[in-house]
Each structure stands twice: as structure tokens, then as C-alpha cells.
Image (spheres, helix red, strand yellow):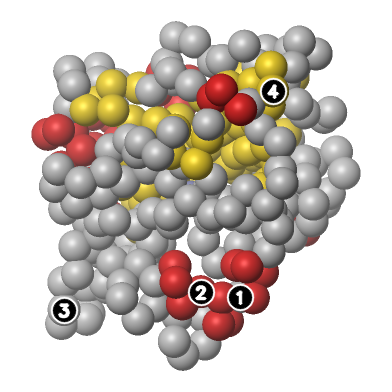
Amino acid sequence: MTGNQWGYGKDDGPSAWNTNYPVADGDRQSPIDILPHQARHDPNLGPIVLNYDRCTSINIANNGHSVVVEFEDSDDRSVIQGGPLDNPYRLKQFHFHWGGKGCHGSEHTVEGNSYASELHLVHWNAVKFKTFGEAASTSDGLAVLGIFLETGDEHRWLHMITDALYTVKFKGSVTDFKGFNPKCLLPSSLHYWTYLGSLTTPPLHESVIWIVVKEPMIVSEKQLGKFRTLVFTGEEEDERTRMENNFRPPQLLKGRTVRSSN
Ligand SMILES: NS(=O)(=O)c1cc(F)ccc1F
Ligand SMILES: [Zn+2]
């Protein structure tokens, strides 16, 4: 792996990340396999509260690892609070991880079972930190809401994302994407598990309070298939490597406790 060139292939994938990012072998790495019966139900864990009503999406992009929708985060217009969080955390971006055709692609697993895909809504603590970058490299600077995607009926709002994917096929492409409120993607119940972990891609900073929602959102195989029309490579490169299986497998729990909202 030259420089910071990491990926999901045989030579640059998760098993090789610890070469350039030794924290990969740290003691609060993500994702993990969640064992519901070993999670501690904590009655003090209140509900997750999302205030996305004035959220401002900016663009959708292919960063060579996933498809990302970025938000305006210069004020507290879209925040997550409650649950395990002591402060409101500002929405910065959301992105997905997914598998190949018929394979599973979530990052977190539940009793060894993985879902077809996983949505990550990334938030940062703007009370304690001045910039996202600072928050992302400091313990508990980030709160990531993880939502599983399961195949079934078509999701009535996901087409807003999948219809735009052709415009960001290649690494480095960015397209305007305004007026999208991710609240429309969330399942009806926000019961969750929570634990202290890390970014699931390099630099793998151990800065994340993970909030993994128990109820999956249901999307169709056709909708999921559109994510696989993206490629990891840039338009100018001659190879076209289909973007799929961009997930890190579960990491060791190393004594951490997973709490359950209920
Ligand atoms: N997959 S993740 O939500 O842990 C994540 C979020 C970021 F903002 C940056 C890197 C990451 F790996
Ligand atoms: Zn992610």
C-alpha cells in the first residue's frame, strides 16, 4: 500500500490496514458483532432525538470508498441528541456500505448475521470541538447512527438517492444534492444498541459513540443493485472496479459493554 492508498481489495483491504494505521489493532475498534442477549439494558438510556427539520444537504459524491451526502454544518440546524449523548451532535454527512450481488454488506452484525447494507449518519460534537476534523480524531468527538438495510419491498424514498447515483459513478465525482432530509430513510422505531468504537475506515480513529438502530429499513434488491453501478476508480483510469463489498468485518470487543435502549 503506497501512502494512504487503502481500499477493500486483497492487497489493500481491512486485513492490511494495520500496516499504515496501527490503531486498527486497538481496543475500541468498529464494527463489532452485536449479541443482543449480552447487551445490558440501561433504563437511563433515553430515546434518540433527531432534529433534522432544517437540515441542508449540499452535494452527493463518490469518494472512491462509498457514496456520501454532505450537509451544511456551520450551525445547529440538524442535530442528534439524547440517548447516550451529553451534547447535541451536528449532522455532517451520511454514506453507505454494501455487499456484492446476493452477498451481505453491513459492517455491524447481529449474532453473526449481516444485513445487505448499512447506512451511517455521521455527526460531530460542535460544543466541544471547533472543526469536524478535530472531533473525528478525539475520543467521543463523533456520534454515528447506524441503520441496517434489508432487502424486501421497494423503499419509497430511497429512489431520491439511487436516482442520483449515475451522476457520481466515478471516484472524485460530485453533484449538487439539495433539499434532501435523511429523516425519510429512518425506520419507525429508533430503539438501539450503543457502544464506544471507531471509524470503520482509515484513519480508524477511536472517536465514535456508535448508536446502532435495531429495526432495519427495507429496500428492494433493484434499489440496492444501483449502488453496485458505482466504481471505486476514477473516470481517467482504465480499469473499472465495481464499488461493492466496501465493508470492514467485525472487530474484537476487547471487554467493551454494549448497552441497549430497550
Ligand atoms: N464508516 S464511519 O461512519 O465509521 C466513518 C465516518 C467518517 F466520517 C469517516 C470515516 C469513517 F469510517
Ligand atoms: Zn460508514
Amino acid on which the number 2 mark rests in the picture: Trp
- 48 left or right, relative to 202: right
Element at label 1: loop
Amino acid on which the number 1 mark rests in the picture: Tyr
Which one is in front, 92 or 137?
137
| Residue 165 in view, yes or no | no
Question: Which mark sits nearer the N-terminus, 3 or 2?
Answer: 2
Give the percent coordinates (x, y) of residue 133: 71, 59
Q: Nearer the viewer, mark 4 or mark 2?
A: 4
Q: CA distance from mark 4 to mark 2?
A: 31 Å
Q: Is mark 1 within 8 Å of ligand 1?
A: no
The residue identified by callout 1 is 21
Element at label 3: loop
Amino acid on which the number 3 mark rests in the picture: Glu
- Is disc 4 in contact with disc 3, using a CB cutoff of under 8 Å? no
- State the residue at coordinates (25%, 17%): 156
Q: Nearer the viewer, mark 1 or mark 3?
A: 1
Q: CA distance from mark 3 to mark 2?
A: 23 Å
- 261 left or right, relative to 105: right
Amino acid on which the number 4 mark rests in the picture: Arg
Give the percent coordinates (x, y) of residue 108: 46, 41
The residue identified by callout 2 is 17
The residue identified by callout 4 is 40
Q: Nearer the viewer, mark 4 or mark 3?
A: 4
Question: Which mark sits nearer the N-terminus, 1 or 3?
Answer: 1
Labelled disc at residue 239:
3
Element at label 4: strand
- State the residue at coordinates (44%, 9%): 188
Give the percent coordinates (x, y) of residue 136: 70, 55
Give the percent coordinates (x, y) of residue 249: 43, 54
